[in-house]
Image: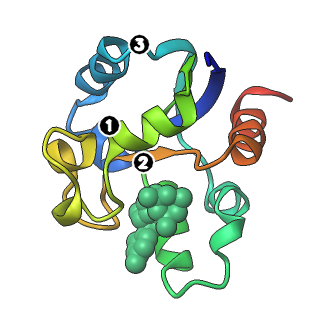
């Protein structure tokens, strides 16, 4: 059954810095995820802390928020059939070393923290995360 969804994708500072935006966008487009809206911006550490609030009890939370706010990021609303799961599949495992061949994290990720992309993990979080960046 066809299920058209929207999800949030972020190209993280390590990948923006290495000029990988166009290559990553091409992977989404080739896999039938269209980019409905996008922008490049830099967020503050407070904004990153709000965005990653679900991880606030994790040992890596502080470094994660410092990292996401350390340089420009590129955020996108992706739309397509099963977009949430499809984006997660295209991204690959959180740790690039464990990611499948040809996934974005395998191709471009440097380490578990500098893993090039973020993607919403559920419908509920996709809505929240799209609103975080694209609605006032
Ligand atoms: O991004 P993903 O949903 O795959 O992973 P997560 O478990 O939601 O963690 C969010 C982000 O925290 C990851 O993408 C990593 O950049 C970072 N992280 C980390 O630095 N060290 C860990 N042990 C786990 C996650
Ligand atoms: Mg996650």
Depth check, mark 2 against mark 3: the one in front is 3
Residue 92 on image: x %, y %: 31, 49
Instruction: Name the residue located 31 percent from the left edge and 55 percent from the top edge.
Output: 115
Q: Quadrant of ligand 1?
A: bottom left
* 2 and 1 marks in contact (CB < 8 Å): yes
Report which quarter residue 21 is drawn in. Answer: top left
Q: Earlier in the sequence, mark 2 or mark 3?
A: 3
Horizontal side of residue 51 vs 118, given as left or right: right
Tag nearer the camera, 3 or 1? 3
* Residues at marks 3 and 1 touching, judged by CB atoms closer than 8 Å: no
Q: Label 2 vs label 3: CA separation?
A: 29 Å
The part of the image, by quadrant, that contains residue 28 is top left
**What secondary structure is found at the residue carrying circle 1?**
helix
Residue 47 horizontal side relative to residue 34, left or right: right
Return the residue at label 1: 16
- Which numbered dot is residue 83? none
Q: Is residue 74 above or below residue 14?
A: above
Residue under label 2? 71
Q: Which residue is mark 3?
A: 32
Whether the residue under disc 1 has CB within 8 Å of ligand 1: no
Total tally of numbered discs in the picture: 3
State which quadrant residue 19 falls in: top left
Vertical comparison of 98 with 16: above or below: below
Other-residue count near label 1 (Cα within 10 Å), few / some / many at <14 / 14–19 / ≥20: some
| 80 vs 36, nearest the viewer | 80
């Amino acid at each position: 059954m066809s299920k058209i969804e929207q999800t949030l994708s972020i190209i993280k500072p390590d990948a923006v810095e290495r000029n990988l935006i166009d290559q990553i966008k091409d992977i989404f487009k080739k896999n039938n995820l269209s980019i409905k809206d996008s922008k490049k911006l830099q967020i503050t550490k407070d904004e990153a802390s709000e965005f990653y609030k679900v991880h606030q009890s994790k040992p890596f939370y502080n470094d994660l928020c410092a990292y996401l706010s350390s340089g420009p990021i590129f955020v996108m609303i992706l739309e397509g059939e099963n977009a949430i799961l499809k984006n997660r599949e295209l991204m690959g495992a959180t740790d690039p070393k464990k990611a499948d061949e040809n996934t974005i994290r395998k191709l471009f990720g440097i380490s578990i923290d500098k893993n090039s992309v973020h993607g919403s993990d559920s419908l509920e979080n996709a809505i929240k995360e799209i609103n975080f960046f694209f609605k006032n």
